[in-house]
Image (cartoon, rainbow, N blue to C red):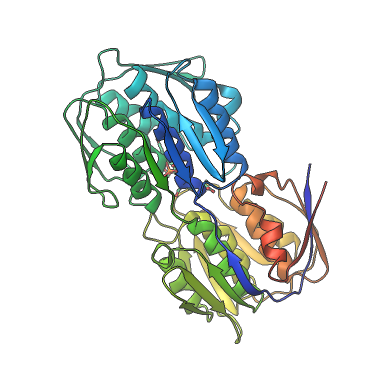
Amino acid sequence: MDKFVVQGGARLEGSIAVGGAKNSALPVMAACLLTSEPVLLRRIPRVRDIRTMQRLLVDIGARAEWSRGHLHVQAAEILSPEAPYELVKTMRASSLVLGPLVARAGRARVSLPGGCAIGARPINLHVAGLEQLGARIRQIHGYVEAEAPNGLRGAGIRFDRVTVTGTEDLIMAAVLAAGETVLENAAREPEVADLCQLLVRMGARIEGAGTPTIRIQGVERLHGAEHTIIPDRIEAGTFLIAGAITGGDLLVAGCDPEHLSALVAKLQQAGAEVLPEGPDALRVRTSARLRSADVETQEYPGFATDLQAQYMALMTQAEGIAIITETIFENRFMHALEMARMGANIRLEGRQAIVAGPRELTGAGVIASDLRASASLVLAALVARGETVIDRVYHIDRGYEKIEEKLAGVGARIRRVE
Ligand code: EPZ
């Protein structure tokens, strides 16, 4: 298993490039199952979760190949409308094929994901929505089996709580359903809007993407299309925090500043200078000491849960007490315990982490528990005195493309060892 070895203390300076959004690429790849025609996808990041989704599409019967840096997907036929436990247990987002498979093939068999390092994360809302669209559902032997031999029917569906992949799954089911579907309390994340943009290019009729109410008029068939996915706002946010925590001067290039406004506001409140440089870059600089600023995670456009761990690393270096409240997932504080081993003063009380800073961190051996937790440990290591060895970096490889090379390119002393 690979590890990262980081020598702390380097200021990050220069320009660092953001790749395509993993959480946009995954639903967009699943959407390719909705048509027999070819779909060309640009800016798909080369990360492990994408390879897992590629494998899943191929197992289902699609072709999914890289050519000149782009991903070409064609699901001429659906041979096996299934997502087996072996894949779903390594990547929960595999359940994104449920909606498209029922819509296109009239049936699907998808493993239930089971628990996860950050919370229970059930998919009951995906399943209930599909039932409302007329699918017959059975849960048996750890699988969801869905059938709609005569096709799905449009319906009014109100989500009990906001779910990102749940919204995406049901949009993909509804685009081929007969009649109108109205999704209420839908997720407003930019990745949902990006998926809708591709679907519209494929011939779907969707209104209200990016708002809580999405209206879909079902069509009989979809056709091939080309699409460039949005930049990864979580990778960009991780780099902004890397610049701020090291007291550096970093240009985060190829991002969408609008998608980062909640984080940028917090960084400014904490005393970092963050300014746009053109339409698709942000520059972060920190000259004065950082100040604490409380954060509560929220659905988009609020502060992203996927940046909470990285922000906690930043707050260990800020003057004062910061209260970090996690409202999306019930167990997303594993990184706090590892940071405490590096010398951070963090107290956990239910859904809140109380961080008292600044504290000098010292290098230690630490273990990454999930994707964003690993990123936060890299950030803590960048400012720790001495050497930090981060184990289980396969977590980080799920969602960050060559993060060690990108960070080393702006001055970080980080290397991968096998
Ligand atoms: C997406 O997960 C992201 N994954 C996550 O990114 C992200 O943390 C999360 O949204 C929140 O922003 C992808 O886009 C592939 P949810 P998702 O359904 O869709 C509860 C990362 O690091 N819920 O919006 O699985 C659920 O337990 C990751 O890249 C139900 O109760 O999250 C959670 O508490 C990790 N029933 C809340 O809703 C359901 O049927 C929000 O989850 C569905 C969700």
Q: Quadrant of the N terminus?
A: top right
Q: Is residue 381 left or right of residue 71?
A: right
Relative depth, front residue between 79 and 170? 79
- Place residue 85 in its image quadrant: top right
Q: Is residue 178 left or right of residue 6?
A: left
Relative depth, front residue between 243 and 67? 67
Q: Quadrant of ligand 1?
A: top left
Query: Residue reaching furthest front?
Result: 68
Query: Residue reaching furthest top?
Result: 149
Query: Residue reaching furthest bottom?
Result: 288
- Place residue 127 in its image quadrant: top left
Q: Is residue 148 left or right of residue 28?
A: left
Residue displayed at 50% across by 50% down: 43
Say if 78 sits above or below 51 in the image. Answer: above
- Place residue 220 in its image quadrant: top left
Q: Is residue 162 left or right of residue 24?
A: left
Total numbered labels placed on residues in the image: 0
Q: Is residue 293 at least partly visible in the picture? A: no
Residue displayed at 63% across by 59% down: 376
Where in the figure is residue 42, as x and y percent of width and height? 48, 47
Relative depth, front residue between 222 and 209? 222
Q: Is residue 133 at least partly visible in the picture? A: yes
Say if 108 sits above or below 19 in the image. Answer: above
Where in the figure is residue 331, as x and y percent of width and height? 55, 47
Say if 342 sits above or below 272 in the image. Answer: above
Residue displayed at 36% across by 60% down: 301
Where in the figure is residue 53, as x and y percent of width and height? 54, 33
Where in the figure is residue 136, as x and y percent of width and height? 31, 16
